[in-house]
Every structure is written in structure tokens, then in C-alpha cells.
Amino acid sequence: MNNSIQHRSTRIRTFVYCVLGFHAVVALIAPFLPLMPTDKQDSGAMLQGFSSAHWLGTDALGRDVLSRTLHGGRPSLAIAILATALSAVIGIALGSLAALAGGWVDEALSRLIDFLLALPTLILLLLIASFFGHDPFILIVTLGFMYAAPIARVARASTQVLLARDFVRVARLQGGRGVNILLGEVLPNVWRVVFTEIAMQFTWIILAFSSLSFLGLGASPPTPEWGLMIAEARSYMTINPTAVIAPIVMLASLVLAVQALVDRE
């Protein structure tokens, strides 16, 4: 029984790794694949179904759906990776410093974390995107700050546990100062603990960026991006449903694969 469960778990993990590997490879090599240009319009093949020239058909402007779908993960992954890295740095720094400093510093940073957690994330993202437009730098910074709070909360709790461990006490007895203990003893161990939370925030950031693109405030046309593709094709999905289904499948498979990987760590 145990062997059967373990074998099934191994197969699921392998499948998850394959899905993640597929997305990573496609994002890297999509520009070098023998695909049609993502912005090439064919007025004679608008909303065409499956064909030898267009394996997944075309959209309302005659652009190849397969090419745009395979390229569509590049902007989402780029934004999500950079924003997640920023949120991880901010979250771990805030949480670790709060736990290490204690006293009024811990209280102030904890209230800041609670404040960020209480903010209506999507509404604020919509307001900021509406004000600053489609600037990728602004989106990365905004997403990084907005999704740092959950990481900070986990990092603070983990740091408090680590500070009570024997190896940290030994480091203090040997004359280690706060910064040295934080960099040498706490952060390497906190990183391992908060990895799960960081991965979860990565999926939320991808969904947030795709949602902004769907609403016209993320990626700008004619950029191939999954959320934007869904928005552009939703009015014609009865004619060529693959124009909507393809980006949905890619987005959902990436998010679910990351979440499945996290659940099994």
C-alpha cells in the first residue's frame, strides 16, 4: 500500500516537473522556434479554425494562435520572476529584522505588515496601473511590494523560532552581533522555510499580472500575453474557441504545477 502511494506520488511529481520544464523551455526558445511572427496579420484568414498553416487557428486579426500562445508566457514569467524576487527580498528583510530587533521595531514592522495584508490588492493594482500606464518597471515594483507582506509574516515567525535555537545562542556567546547573526545564521535557514510562501506568491503575481492584462492595464497590444489574448478573443470564442482555450490552458497549467510542487515539498 505504501509503495503504491509512493509510486503514485513520484509519478505526480515527475509530471509536475515536466509541466514546469515545458513552460521554462518554451519561454526560453519560443523566439527561435519556426513559428509565424506573433504580430503578422492575415486578413484572409481571420478567425480561422485548425489548418495546416495555423495549427490552433487564428484570432480576429488573422494572427497565429499557436505562435502567440507559446510566446505568451514570456512577459508573464519575466514580470512574475522579477516581482517575486523583489517581494522575497523585501519580505524576508522586513520579517527577519522585525524578529531580530524586537521591541518597538518589531511592533512597528508588524503593524506595517498587517497594514499591507489588509490592503485590497487588486483594486490598488488597478489604480496604480491606471495612473502610470503600462510601465513594466512600475508593475514589477508595485507587485513586489504588494505581495511581500505574506512572505514577511512567515519570515518573522520563522526567525523568532530560529532565534531560540542553540546554534544562534552559541553564535551570540561567541560575540556575534545582530547583523552577523542575521546574515550568517538566520537568513540561510529562513530562506528554506519561506520558499513555499515565495512560490505561492509567484503564482498570485502571475495571476495578478494576467488579470491586469485582461483588463487592459498590464501588457499592451500587440504583445502576446495570456491574459490579453483571452480578453481579445473572448468575444469570438464561439467561432474559434482555441483562441481563448489555449492561453487559459497554458496559464492554468503553470499555476497549478507550481502549486502542486509546493504542496509536495
Image (cartoon, helix red, strand yellow):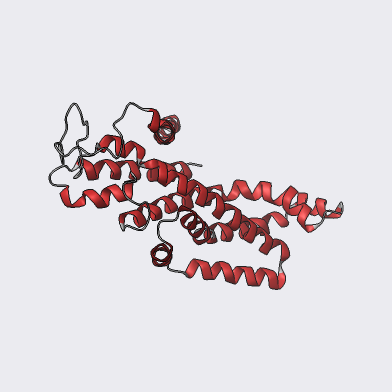
Q: As drawn, is 207 to the left or to the right of 159?
A: left
Relative horizontal placement of residue 47, taking residue 208 as reference (left or right): left
Tell me residue 101's x, y (percent): 72, 65
The image quarter in which residue 248 lies: top left
Label tally: 0
Give me the residue at 67% from left, 46% from top: 188
Q: Closer to the camera, 30 or 96? A: 30
Say which of 8 and 247 sits in front. 247
Above or below, 204 against 45 in this view is below
Q: Residue at x 49, y 46 (%)?
A: 81
Residue for point 71% across, 71% down: 103
Question: Horizontal placement of 50 versus 194: left or right?
Answer: left
Horizontal side, residue 262 vs residue 97: left or right: left
Question: Looking at the image, which residue is at 21% across and 51% down?
Answer: 234
The answer to which image quadrant residue 245 occupies is: top left
- Does 218 sit above or below residue 18? below
Placement of the N terminus among the 4 image quadrants: top left
Most foreground residue, 265 or 48:
48
Q: Position of residue 48 (x, y in %)?
A: 15, 37
The extreme right residue here reads: 174
116 w.r.t. 54: above or below: below
Residue 71: percent from left, percent from top: 35, 38
Q: Residue 25, percent across and down?
A: 43, 31
Q: Is residue 84 above or below residue 58?
A: below
Q: Quadrant of residue 163?
A: bottom right
